[in-house]
């Protein structure tokens, strides 16, 4: 997915431009740190105190120049208007967050307001059109049958969460002024791999297959996750 994001950034902004990036729900800060190392000015927003502590510890081990380019704020992604002025960022990331938000539309509208004109909104969501794939491939037939008619599911952490359908998010993004520019599938073939599975020797080939599938119909439509990129008008 990092390659997909970099592709969108390179295709939208002048080479060498230092972008203002907001990572909402940054977790332990992996993506935020990667972008700070690439020269961008990054703000990470995270409400989980444990994750914030991990991110701050990781940042503390970075060279001074990178530490100066990244700030971490403990807070809720639904309160971006409290922390920032509209149009403050060139890129807003919201990866792996919407599945935990019961009513995502207000959050998405707030994120769109944070974007400067021409800014990029990057979302990573659970694919609500493919919820039957995981239980089906694991032989859970009753679970697969139920999954066809819902966007609710239980994740690997045992939490009851929700997924999003491409059609619905396309409509939402258009309505908040950041219409869908392109989308990718993520984890087309690897979603059923058990946690802790050993990395295969031919991991580069695996990544190449996933990358190709994530850009190719019909494969991307059955991916476990969707990466959507909207652009602020």
Image: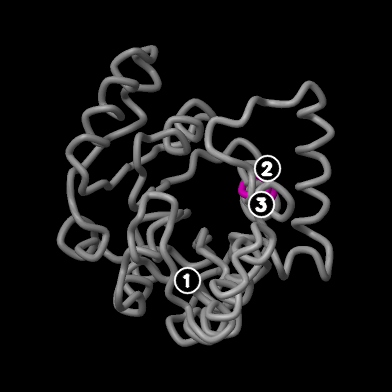
Instruction: Kindly state the secondary structure of the residue where label 3 is placed.
Output: loop
Residue bearing mark 2: 3
Residue bearing mark 1: 163
Q: Is residue 219 left or right of residue 110?
A: right
Q: Is residue 222 left or right of residue 63?
A: right
Q: Quadrant of residue 196?
A: top right
Which mark is in front, 3 or 2? Answer: 3
Q: Which residues are magenta?
A: 3-7
Residue bearing mark 3: 187
Q: Quadrant of residue 55?
A: top left
Contact between labelled residues 2 and 3, with CB atoms less than 8 Å apart:
no
- On screen, 213 above or below 141? above
Q: Nearer the viewer, residue 180 or 154?
A: 154
Spot occupied by residue 149 in the image (x, y as percentages of width and height): 54, 86
Task: Name which of mark 3 and mark 2 comes first in the sequence.
Answer: 2
- On screen, 87 above or below 195? below
Q: Residue at x 35, y 34 (%)?
A: 28
Q: Nearer the viewer, residue 153 or 184?
A: 153
Q: Is residue 200 left or right of residue 140?
A: right
Task: Name which of mark 2 and mark 1 comes first in the sequence.
Answer: 2
Q: Is residue 6 magenta?
A: yes
Q: Whole-Å distance between the Cαs marked 3 and 1? A: 15 Å
Q: Main secondary structure of the magenta part?
A: helix
Q: Is residue 90 magenta?
A: no
Q: Residues within 10 Å of mark 1 (few under 14, many from 20)?
A: many
Contact between labelled residues 1 and 3, with CB atoms less than 8 Å apart:
no
């Amino acid at each position: 997915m990092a390659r997909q994001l970099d592709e969108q950034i390179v295709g939208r902004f002048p080479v060498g431009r230092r972008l203002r990036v907001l990572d909402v729900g940054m977790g332990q800060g992996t993506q935020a740190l990667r972008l700070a190392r690439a020269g961008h000015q990054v703000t990470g927003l995270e409400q989980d105190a444990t994750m914030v502590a991990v991110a701050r510890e990781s940042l503390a081990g970075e060279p001074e120049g990178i530490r100066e380019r990244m700030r971490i704020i403990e807070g809720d992604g639904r309160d971006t208007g409290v922390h920032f002025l509209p149009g403050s960022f060139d890129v807003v990331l919201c990866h792996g967050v919407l599945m935990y938000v019961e009513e995502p539309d207000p959050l998405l509208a707030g994120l769109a307001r944070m974007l400067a004109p021409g800014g990029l909104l990057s979302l990573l969501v659970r694919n609500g059109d493919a919820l039957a794939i995981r239980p089906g491939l694991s032989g859970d037939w009753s679970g697969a049958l139920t999954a066809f008619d819902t966007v609710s599911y239980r994740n690997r952490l045992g939490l009851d969460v929700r997924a999003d359908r491409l059609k619905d998010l396309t409509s939402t993004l258009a309505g908040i002024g950041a219409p869908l520019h392109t989308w990718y599938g993520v984890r087309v073939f690897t979603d059923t791999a058990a946690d802790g599975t050993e990395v295969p020797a031919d991991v580069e080939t695996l990544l190449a297959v996933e990358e190709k599938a994530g850009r190719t119909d019909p494969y991307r439509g059955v991916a476990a996750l969707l990466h959507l990129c909207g652009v602020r008008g």
